[in-house]
């Protein structure tokens, strides 16, 4: 019986190391599992960070493209639309008068822009030498003072006008009666030369703010 007891003790003693080895192996496996989990978590974190960076970069690219597109749209916008808005509410005739005076008016510092319509067939100088007529309807623009002088023209309806080199009505001879020695034939020749020398000029749209400001001085 003593021998049997000793043998059992020896067997139990021999089994103990096996149990310890098993525990060690299980502990190692747990550590490996934890390590794998940590690596997976780190890998996922790096992947998420990469996705976030890509998303931010894409957002920046989209924002840049949108800005460039908007700039192109702004640069390609039609200035005519802006001009039409600025001059909205004014007639084509008013805009024409102001543009022509800004282009040809002898004095730009006027307090009033007078508009006189002269029909075709009206003599160039109706008071003393009604011998040569305007071949077409004309418009005469003038200031409120004699020093402002005048611009006489006819419109061609295509952005150009025919300019007649004539003085303000009533100012042909400086506002005084002509010399009695003036020959009618000579005056006729002078008037006909004026008609023949009519100059066609393109009317530049000019600065619309200046046009709008001058329209306020129109008196017709």
Image: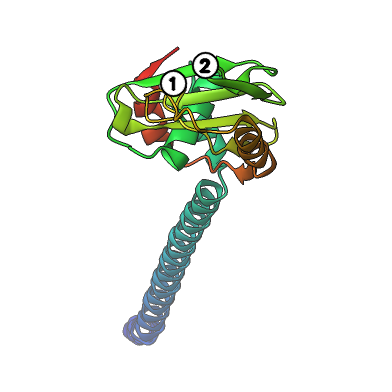
Residue 207 lies in quadrant: top left
Task: In the rendered view, tell whether residue 75 sits above or below residue 126.
Answer: below
Query: Looking at the picture, how far across and down is residue 169, in whole percent?
Result: 47, 22
Instruction: Give whichever of 9, 127 is nearer the camera.
Output: 127
Q: Quadrant of the C terminus?
A: top left
Residue where numbered disc 2 is placed: 127
Under circle 2, the secondary element is loop
Query: Looking at the picture, how far across and down is residue 65, in whole percent?
Result: 53, 57
**Label 1 neighbourhood size at 10 Å, few (<14), some (14-19), many (20+)?**
some
Query: Looking at the picture, how far across and down is residue 20, in whole percent?
Result: 35, 81
Q: Residue at x 51, y 56 (%)?
A: 68
User: Would residue 65 be visible to someone looking at this image?
Assistant: yes
In the image, taking residue 164 as reference, residue 9 lies left or right, namely left
Residue 23 lies in quadrant: bottom left
- Which callout, 1 or 2, points to the residue nearer the camera? 2
Query: What is the CA distance from the residue labelled 1 to the residue labelled 2?
Result: 8 Å
Task: In the rendered view, tell whether residue 128 sits above or below residue 73.
Answer: above
Query: Looking at the picture, how far across and down is residue 29, in whole percent?
Result: 44, 76
Q: Residue at x 66, y 38 (%)?
A: 189
Numbered mark located on residue 80 in the image: none
**Label 2 neighbourhood size at 10 Å, few (<14), some (14-19), many (20+)?**
few
Task: In the rendered view, tell whether residue 173 sits above or below residue 27.
Answer: above
Instruction: Give whichever of 111, 194 is nearer the camera.
Output: 194
Which callout, 1 or 2, points at the residue further toward the start of the chain? 2
Residue where numbered disc 1 is placed: 170
Q: Residue at x 33, y 85 (%)?
A: 13
- Asked if the residue at tag 2 contacts the one at tag 1, i.e. Cβ–Cβ closer than 8 Å, the answer is yes
Q: Quadrant of the N terminus?
A: bottom left
Identify the colour scheme used.
rainbow
Under circle 1, the secondary element is loop
In the image, taking residue 111 as reference, residue 216 lies left or right, namely right
């Amino acid at each position: 019986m003593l021998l049997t007891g000793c043998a059992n003790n020896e067997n139990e003693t021999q089994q103990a190391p096996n149990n310890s080895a098993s525990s060690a192996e299980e502990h190692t496996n747990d550590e490996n599992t934890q390590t794998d989990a940590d690596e997976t978590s780190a890998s996922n974190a790096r992947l998420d960070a990469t996705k976030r960076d890509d998303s931010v970069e894409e957002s920046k690219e989209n924002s840049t493209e949108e800005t460039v597109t908007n700039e192109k749209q702004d640069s390609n916008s039609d200035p005519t639309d802006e001009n039409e808005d600025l001059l909205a509410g004014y007639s084509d005739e008013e805009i024409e008068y102001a543009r022509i005076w800004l282009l040809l008016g002898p004095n730009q510092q006027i307090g009033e822009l007078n508009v006189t319509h002269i029909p075709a067939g009206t003599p160039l100088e109706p008071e003393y030498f009604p011998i040569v007529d305007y071949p077409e309807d004309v418009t005469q623009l003038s200031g409120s003072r004699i020093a402002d002088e005048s611009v006489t023209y006819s419109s061609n309806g295509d952005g150009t006008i025919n300019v007649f080199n004539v003085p303000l009505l009533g100012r042909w001879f400086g506002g005084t009666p002509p010399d009695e020695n003036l020959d009618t034939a000579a005056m006729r020749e002078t008037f006909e030369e004026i008609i023949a020398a009519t100059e066609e000029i393109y009317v530049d749209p000019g600065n619309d703010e200046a046009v709008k400001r001058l329209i306020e001085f129109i008196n017709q």
